[in-house]
Every structure is written in C-alpha cells, then in structure tokens.
Image (cartoon, helix red, strand yellow):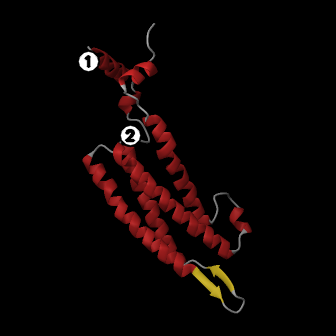
Amino acid sequence: MAKSSTQEASDTGNWNVAGVFSLDVIMYHIYYIDRCELAAEFGSIEPGQSGFMNDSEKAIARLEGAEMMLKHLSMLVSSSRFGVKKAADKTRLEALTPRIKKVKIILSLIKSGSEKMNHKENIRYYDIDEESFEKCLEALIKLKEETYDIINNSDMLYTSPDETDPGKLKEMYMAKLTSRG
C-alpha cells in the first residue's frame, strides 16, 4: 500500500506548517491590527457604535485601540523574523523594533497627558491631544504598511507566481522526485 504524503512527511520529519502558521499567527495579528486601527481612529470597530459613547469613553477606546494595534504590530514583527529570507528585508524588519518602541513611549506620554481631573465634581476623564495622537497613529500606520511589505516580500502573505504556475510546480515536483534517488 502506498504511503500518503502526510505519512511520508511524518516518517521523514519534513512537516511544512507554513500555511497553518501563516493563518494562525501572521494573519491573526494582521486581522487585529486592522481592527485596532479602526478603534484607534473612531473609538469603535463598528460604524455608529462610538456615537453611544461620551467623549471620555471614546478617548479611552481610541487610546486602547492604538495600544493594542502597537502590541499586535510588535508581535507580528517578532513572529515574522524567521520567515524573512532576504538580508535587506531582515535588516528592514529589525529596524522596525526600535521605531515601535519609540511610538510606544510617545503613546504612553499621550495617554498620561490625556487623563484629566475635574476637581469640582471629583470626576476623572480623558481628553486626547488630537494633533499628537494623529501623528502617533500615522506613525503606527506607516509601521504597519512597512511590516506588511516586508513579510509580503517573503511570500508570507501572497504566494509568488512560481508557486501558482502549474508548469513550474510540475518542474519543482519532478526535480524533487528525481533528487530523492
């Protein structure tokens, strides 16, 4: 009885979990980065939902959205390191980490400066410095775009044309078969 490709991979230890990893880790973070960007911009991920929040609640939701976007972005960069093959892309990816840390510090300062106190009514509330927050959000979006570009260059998002061309796939398969001996 012929072995299935799964049994063969199991016997040789050649498991390829790139597809599963890409879905479970890479795409997970990309999904949440985009959702967090919406929350950072509007205070909510759903249209109209932020209309039911007062200004302080919306400010908190926007700050939390930016913080979560930053965390998912940091985790995406960390999770993508091993899959980036080109030296230039590895260098670009590694250069993102200090920039992410810098944005984290700036965001922390914006958050701490947003917390206000109404002493007359003894109420704590949040009021974002919009100009600073928008610059911080722009920096986050730029980091996101650069990260996506780098991981896409390594075919971690979209496959290269070589992987989808049936003729090339047949050639690669035949080469593997003949090199096994």
Q: Give the residue at x 44% y 13%.
A: 3
The extreme top residue here reads: 1
Q: Where residue 130 sits: x, y (%)? A: 54, 76
Three-letter code for the amino acid on which mark 2 is drawn: Asp
Q: CA distance from mark 1 to mark 2?
A: 25 Å
Q: Where residue 53 sits: x, y (%)? A: 71, 70
* Foreground disc of the pair 1, 2: 1
- Label 1 Cα crowd, 10 Å radius (few <14 / some 14-19 / many 20+): few
For the N terminus, give its image quadrant. Answer: top left
**Upstream in the sequence, badge 1 or badge 2?**
2
Secondary structure of the residue carrying tag 1 is: helix
Residue 155 bears which disc, if any? 2
Q: Where residue 91 sits: x, y (%)? A: 28, 54
Three-letter code for the amino acid on which mark 1 is drawn: Ser
- Label 2 Cα crowd, 10 Å radius (few <14 / some 14-19 / many 20+): some
Q: Which residue is mark 1?
A: 179
Depth check: give the residue in front, 62 or 130: 62
Residue 63 is drawn in which quadrant?
bottom right
Q: Is residue 157 above or below residue 66?
A: above
Q: Give the residue at x 34% y 54%.
A: 93
Q: Give the residue at x 60% y 62%.
A: 39
